[in-house]
Image (cartoon, rainbow, N blue to C red):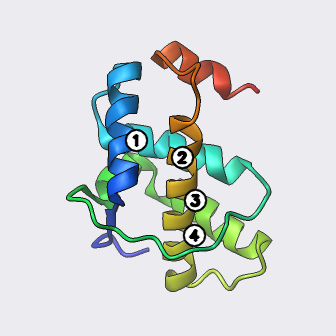
Amino acid sequence: MPSEITIRLSQTAKDQLSRLKRHTGMTQWNELCRWALAMSLRDSSAPLVRDIVTDSNVEIAWKTFTGQHSDIYLSLLKQRCVADGQEPNDDAVNKTLHIHLHRGIGYLAGRQDLRSIQDLLAITTE
């Protein structure tokens, strides 16, 4: 995925992340988004494919989103494309990223037991 990719979020996802930031004490969008992506990717079911309206003012550059682990995130997304029967080209990877990111944000936002970073760590072993 080219480094100039910018990830935009829907207004709903922005609102959910704002609540999650308050509850967990995490301060960076990209950190919560990494957790959200990982939560969705670990679920083997296919997300409901839908168009996501990226109508918020939250934009995250790919490099900021992935930090020093760009190759790992790109590999995970390509692997998921292949697992879902898609050619892992730039368009499919980008769509997979947005769909899984938004599903993961929804997963995290729906957790009533998520009140701290420790709670976030605890759900990774479920």
Q: Are marks 4 and 3 in contact (CB under 8 Å)?
A: yes
Q: CA distance from mark 4 to mark 1?
A: 20 Å
What is the crowding at mark 4: few (fewer than 14 residues within 10 Å), some, or many (at least 20)? many
Label 4 element class: helix
Q: Amino acid at mark 1?
A: Gln
Q: Amino acid at mark 3?
A: His
Residue 106 got which mark? 2
Q: Earlier in the sequence, mark 2 or mark 3?
A: 3
Q: Are marks 2 and 1 in contact (CB under 8 Å)?
A: yes
Q: CA distance from mark 4 to mark 2?
A: 15 Å
Residue beneath the point at 32% across and 42% down? 29
In which quadrant of the rendered view does residue 120 lie? top right
Q: Are marks 2 and 3 in contact (CB under 8 Å)?
A: no
Q: Earlier in the sequence, mark 2 or mark 1?
A: 1
Residue beneath the point at 48% across and 65% down? 98
Between label 4 and label 1, give the one nearer the viewer.
Answer: 1
Label 2 element class: helix
Residue 42 got which mark? none
Q: In x, y percent, where is residue 5?
A: 32, 72
Q: Amino acid at mark 2?
A: Gly
Q: Which residue is mark 4?
A: 96
Q: Earlier in the sequence, mark 3 or mark 1?
A: 1
Image quadrant in which the N terminus is located? bottom left
Q: In x, y percent, where is residue 68?
A: 39, 48
**Above or below 122: residue 73:** below
What is the crowding at mark 1: few (fewer than 14 residues within 10 Å), some, or many (at least 20)? some
